[in-house]
Image: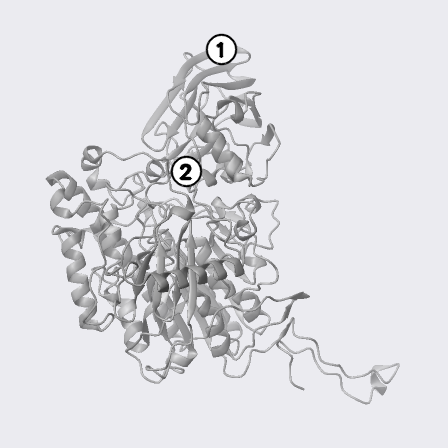
């Protein structure tokens, strides 16, 4: 009987009929329950995704970052020169996993920026099953390692629900992190849904990328030992090379002085190398430079020295990551599984990131809130780049160079610098001649149907009782052994934060609406006032020559096509807010604590993300801890949220009750009690009286013990939108990086006993402190 694989789970076959009361009289033998089998000859599938890597960064695509594993897989497989993603991470990942456009599956932006608009909620519909669900219910073992960033933030808690966690989206195993980025030295991870943390510190040789591959290798070896006939699907999504740039000194030192000639020279060198490799045609030109970004010869000596050091660190970070991929490839070869593995190596989930701003930054959240970092300060910290005291992203100039030969960067869905990335496919048993380049035009939604065709698995029409919306991607298998095959993808729209474009049969019409490193934009034009450009990429590979004035009719035709495609795929209404949407109240979405003004934690609770605890920003609030103080007053953390690059902590140091507010990793404000705390049970209180008059303002701090005021002080500036993407709120300890150097990383647990810690929001809610601009943003968020 042929199995019906379009319906998942696969319907069970009829079993042998019982014909006797007793087993000894049963005439026909019963059929044992057999394990679910994948289609005959189905390969293993591996998808490796590098974060924030531009088209021109890797050596495999002509760039300066040595990536020997990418080179090796290219020699054995195929490089795709016209492969596209969305312009941000969550949307690309949701499109990758489902084979549908990101707005079709409600991921128009990152999860932290989701709103209530249909294409932007961040909730994947059950009608769009994932690759893992489809392969898992067709007999594959499945596992995900690393970055997920597809779960609505309010569901990233111990209360779930867990159906949009990796283990609810088809993965048997998950080891990694749930949000946008992670500290590679002090990560806060999950094993399944259980919070875990490394048992080693940086000084013991720990690094997140190495840890992820260790777990991936162990999982694959175990699968093939227990069930050697069963294919596996392994998804490895690195936190690298997204900020923060965290890598050991020896890796960045390898690139010392390689980038002293600057980003302009690097673009020229990369383009020349791309032509040698055949990645771009000889006619390709460098796309226009972003005129708001200085050229290298416009920088002074200090600015050049700092900028070059950033790029040295990034290149080391990239190579280190690729070396970990190499360890995984070697492990597959060691167990004789590499030849039968469809290995998809995606060198970026969007273009290189310009979110470090013009100068670059050692403190990502500073720029994220609209502030520049100081070049002079960074010059004094240059030797620390890559270590745990930094949270670095390079200057925009390097992002532009890493996207060579294309214009613009991550977030900018209008131009190929934001959406075209290198991609490699290797499958020795399925690709007849390795080492080739494929120039067919493809998109990330094409990965899922490619996997299904290679595995012999049909697109499901019913999964877990839910009818499936059509797969919108096109399989790429037709390109494997036909280098000159005609393109099968004719049309594709792009949109991110108001930046938008349309591709149709070689032509692109594009409009850039915002500037990616202006994370709190002011004065953006109305969408209908945006200026459109037109490019014929059949003759102009890199979108270097705008033909809008020459062919106005063609431009209008493509603009109309964009409206049709955008309407079809749930793109409207357009939304150009960035950092503002990371605050649920501003974005107009419900968070886990919506409407609550008080929460009481018990000692030992923790790992609460920004959207799974009360929002204390931009308002008066208090913290009350019921504790038992040891002799001498004790030491350690009572409660802390965030870490070294933004957050707050209420703690005891040498017996003194203390409060620290770390604003963007730049300004640290500390208030401490005058005297040591007395031993024994008592109630400790922190009160913050917000100044008002806008967001991110200061306030007065008062510390009390047993009802008696023991310390007063002031915080001049507070965090406006978010403390951290990667760090959490914890009771009795500050996990991850420390908010303040008054205590050690990790080893900072309170030495007394904590009964409860209560946070109360006062009546002067955020609404009372909003400016006219803030009110307008909130009003727009609710439309």
Image coordinates for residue 460, horizontal then vertical, percent? 60, 72
Image color mode: one colour
Side (left or right) of 323 relative to 148: left
Placement of the N terminus among the 4 image quadrants: bottom right
Q: Are marks 2 and 1 in contact (CB under 8 Å)?
A: no
Image coordinates for residue 517, horizontal then vertical, percent: 32, 43
Q: Quadrant of the C terminus?
A: top right
Q: Label 2 crowding class (10 Å Cα cut-off): few <14, some 14-19, many 20+? A: some
The residue shown at (52%, 50%) is 120
> Helix or strand or loop: what does disc 1 sit on?
strand
Examine the rendered structure and indicate whether residue 432 appears above or below residue 64.
below
Q: Residue furthest right?
A: 21
Q: Disc number at residue 709? A: 1
Task: Please tell me which residue lies in front, 685 or 719.
Answer: 719
Q: CA distance from mark 2 to mark 1?
A: 30 Å
Please name the residue shown 30% across and 59% down the image.
548
From the image, state whether disc 2 or disc 1 is nearer to you. 1
Residue ID for mark 2: 746
Q: Position of residue 67 (x, y in %)?
A: 26, 64
| In the image, farthest residue toward the bottom | 27
**Residue 422 in the image: above or below residue 721:** below
Q: Nearer the viewer, residue 683 or 164?
A: 164
Circle 2 — which element? loop
Q: Which mark is residue 670?
A: none
Q: Is residue 221 visible?
A: no
> How many tags in the picture?
2
Horizontal and vertical percent position of residue 521? 37, 38
- Rendered position, 37 above or below 393: below
Image point 55% across, 32% down: which residue? 614
């Amino acid at each position: 009987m042929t199995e019906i694989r379009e319906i998942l789970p696969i319907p069970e076959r009829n079993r042998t009929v019982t014909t006797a009361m007793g087993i000894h009289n049963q005439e026909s033998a019963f059929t044992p329950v057999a394990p679910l089998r994948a289609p005959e000859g189905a390969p293993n599938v591996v998808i490796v995704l590098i974060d924030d890597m531009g088209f021109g960064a890797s050596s495999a695509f002509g760039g300066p970052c040595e990536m020997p594993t990418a080179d090796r897989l290219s020699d054995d497989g195929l490089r795709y020169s016209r492969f596209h993603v969305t312009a941000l991470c969550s949307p690309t990942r949701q499109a990758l996993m489902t084979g549908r456009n990101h707005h079709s599956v409600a991921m128009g932006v990152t999860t932290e920026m989701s709103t209530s608009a249909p294409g932007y909620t961040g909730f994947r519909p059950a009608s769009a099953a994932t690759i893992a669900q489809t392969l898992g219910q067709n007999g594959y073992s499945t596992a995900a390692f690393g970055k997920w960033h597809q779960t609505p933030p309010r569901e990233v808690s111990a209360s779930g629900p867990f159906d949009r966690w990796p283990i609810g989206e088809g993965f048997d195993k998950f080891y990694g992190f749930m949000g946008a980025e992670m500290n590679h030295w002090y990560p806060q991870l999950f094993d399944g849904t259980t919070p875990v943390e490394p048992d080693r510190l940086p000084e013991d040789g720990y690094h997140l990328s190495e840890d992820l591959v260790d777990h991936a290798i162990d999982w694959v070896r175990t699968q093939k030992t227990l069930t050697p006939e069963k294919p596996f699907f392994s998804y490895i999504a690195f936190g690298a090379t997204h900020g923060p740039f965290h890598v050991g000194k020896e890796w960045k030192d390898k690139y010392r002085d390689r980038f002293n000639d600057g980003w302009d020279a690097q673009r020229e060198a990369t383009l020349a190398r791309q032509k040698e490799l055949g990645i771009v045609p000889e006619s390709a030109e460098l796309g226009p430079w972003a005129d708001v970004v200085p050229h290298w010869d416009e920088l002074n000596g200090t600015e050049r020295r700092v900028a070059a050091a950033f790029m040295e660190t990034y290149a080391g970070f990239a190579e280190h990551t690729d070396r970990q991929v190499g360890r995984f490839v070697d492990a597959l070869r060691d167990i004789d599984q590499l030849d039968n593995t469809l290995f998809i190596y995606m060198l970026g989930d969007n273009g290189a990131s310009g979110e470090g701003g013009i100068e670059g930054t050692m403190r990502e959240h500073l720029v994220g809130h609209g502030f520049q970092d100081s070049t002079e300060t960074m010059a004094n910290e240059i030797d620390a780049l890559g270590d745990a005291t930094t949270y670095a992203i390079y200057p925009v100039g390097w992002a532009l160079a890493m996207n060579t030969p294309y214009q613009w960067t991550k977030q900018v869905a209008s131009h190929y610098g934001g959406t075209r990335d290198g991609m490699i496919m290797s499958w020795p048993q399925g690709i007849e001649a390795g080492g080739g380049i494929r120039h067919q035009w493809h998109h990330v939604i094409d990965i899922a149907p490619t996997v299904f065709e290679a595995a012999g698995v049909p697109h499901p029409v019913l999964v877990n009782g839910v009818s499936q919306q059509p797969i919108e991607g096109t399989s790429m298998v037709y390109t494997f052994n036909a280098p000159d095959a005609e393109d099968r993808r004719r049309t594709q729209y792009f949109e991110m934060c108001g930046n938008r474009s349309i591709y149709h049969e070689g032509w692109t019409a594009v409009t850039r609406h915002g500037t990616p490193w202006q994370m709190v934009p002011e004065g953006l034009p109305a969408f209908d006032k945006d200026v459109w450009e037109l490019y014929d990429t059949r003759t102009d590979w890199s979108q270097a020559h705008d033909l809008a004035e020459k062919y106005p009719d063609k431009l209008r035709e493509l603009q109309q096509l964009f409206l049709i495609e955008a309407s079809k795929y749930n793109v409207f209404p357009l939304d150009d807010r960035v950092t503002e949407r990371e605050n649920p109240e501003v974005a107009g979405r419900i968070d886990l604590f919506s409407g609550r003004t008080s929460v009481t934690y018990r000692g030992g609770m923790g790992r609460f993300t920004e959207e799974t605890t009360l929002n204390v920003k931009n308002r008066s609030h208090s913290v009350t801890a019921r504790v038992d103080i040891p002799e001498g007053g004790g030491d350690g953390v009572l409660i802390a949220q965030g870490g070294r690059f933004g957050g707050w902590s209420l703690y005891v140091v040498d017996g003194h009750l203390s409060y620290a507010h770390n604003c963007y990793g730049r300004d640290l404000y500390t208030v401490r009690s005058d005297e040591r705390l007395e031993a024994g049970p008592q109630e400790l209180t922190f009160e913050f009286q917000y100044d008002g008059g806008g967001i991110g303002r200061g306030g007065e701090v008062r510390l009390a013990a047993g009802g008696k005021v023991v310390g007063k002080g002031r915080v001049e500036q507070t965090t406006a939108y978010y403390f951290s993407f990667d760090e959490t709120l914890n009771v009795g300890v500050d996990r991850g990086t420390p908010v303040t150097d008054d205590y050690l990383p990790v080893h900072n647990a309170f030495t007394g006993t904590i009964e409860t810690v209560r946070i109360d929001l006062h009546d002067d809610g955020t609404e009372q402190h909003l400016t006219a601009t803030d009110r307008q943003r909130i009003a727009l968020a609710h439309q």
